[in-house]
Image: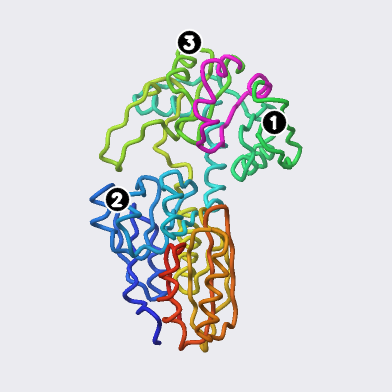
Amino acid sequence: MSTSYPLHKIKVVLLENIHPVAVANLEAAGFTVELHDRAYQGAELLAVAGDAHLIGIRSKTRLTEEFFQGATRLWGVGAFCIGTNQIDLQAAACHGVPVFNEAFSNTRSVAELVIAETVALHRSLCDRSAGMHLGQWRKTATGAHEIRGKTMGIVGYGRIGSQTSVLAEAMGMKVIYHDVVDVLPMGTATKADSLEALLAEADVVTLHVPATEQTKNMIRAEQLALMKRGAYLLNNARGDVVDVEALAAALKDGHLGGAAVDVFPREPGKNISDEFDSPLRGLPNVILTPHIGGSTVEAQINIGQSVSARLAKLMNNGSTATAVNVPHVTLPKLEEDAHRVIHFHHNRPGVLGKINSLIAEMGANISSQYLRTDAKHGYLIIDISPEHGEALKDRLLAVPETIRVRTLW
């Protein structure tokens, strides 16, 4: 099939060992896919992906302003994970590059890990297992507890927090939560009057907040001191949410009974071969995991399917629905008797008037037009008669507010 740009020439670079289902989906769309099992940064990243039309990353690769300046062919970014703090979203938008992530697919994986950690800490399972491997037979009920009847305090009651709430309640726990916005509780969970009230009441505190200036070091020595003696702290959110030095001190002096930490302020940049250090290493009843909260086969399959589908749809018909940094436009299938002109522009008064005047001067027939804007950017799609598509593209490039233009047919 003849298309505005040969499908096999659309280059997709996937980094950090993204699940093969994403490769299969994008190749099925006709694109050429290049797969890498590691992260790249700076000049090395540009050398690998600077000529890509689409790039897929996970949490280690940093997409900076410099990258978007150099990757002049780039039309879309897929973050095959929940977070997008590794991407300069504003820079991407300023270069007309939509960014897609997947905020739902690994929700269950993280929630199940929280429940597993809660049981393991109450039974000191990791320490008992390590002891057995050393030949130590420590059969005692001292310090071992059921989680039924205990109170779980959930800080951040979004998708993961609320899913954790359901599982904890099913295990017989009482659930209280704290969130900065009003959210509907699941089951019989109740909202705590404040973070301080939650910390004082909970037997287990689990954190599920994003990385923002407001959440940075939100759990410090003062907050840890408010927790019950012998309580447990779980952080599967972001590394800079907890002051790990203060957490280590609270564990060493016996104020806390244990902790489970999956994210850290400083994490190795690559994979298995990198060394890891933390003041939490070597402490009893402390579970340390290498940022694997969402790392299950099921989650990676779901993420691979979801994000790759949206990248393919962006290239095939221009849809930006669910993008995290540009206006959302959901578009119908392009009809064979029209060319689609896709126009990213700075959102300034009069832009649409200029464009429509150009079209009127050309005497072109518009079959449909779609526009969405945010405070800084506009995304305009025009389905126009085939004989006018390329000519309109050339004229739009001369409009001062234009960021980029693409034709699609």
Question: Is disc 1 surrounded by few (<14), some (14 to 19) or many (20+) residues within 10 Å?
Answer: many
The residue that disc 2 covers is 38
Q: Pick whichever of labels 1 and 3 is earlier in the sequence.
A: 1
Real-space Cα separation, disc 3 to disc 2, in angstroms: 40 Å
Which residue is rendered at x = 35% and y = 54% of the image?
A: 68
Q: Is residue 119 visible?
A: no
Vertical position of residue 252 compared to residue 280: above or below: above
- Image-quadrant location for residue 174: top right
Residue 162 seen in the figure: yes
Query: Going 69% across and 32% down the picture, which residue do you hit?
Result: 175
Residue 93 appears at what percent x and percent y? 46, 55
On screen, residue 330 versus residue 38, left or right, reads right
232 sits to left or right of 39: right
Residue 75 got which mark? Answer: none
Q: Amino acid at mark 1?
A: Ile
Q: Are marks 1 and 2 in contact (CB under 8 Å)?
A: no
In the image, which disc is placed on residue 176?
1
- Residue 72: x percent and y percent? 33, 62
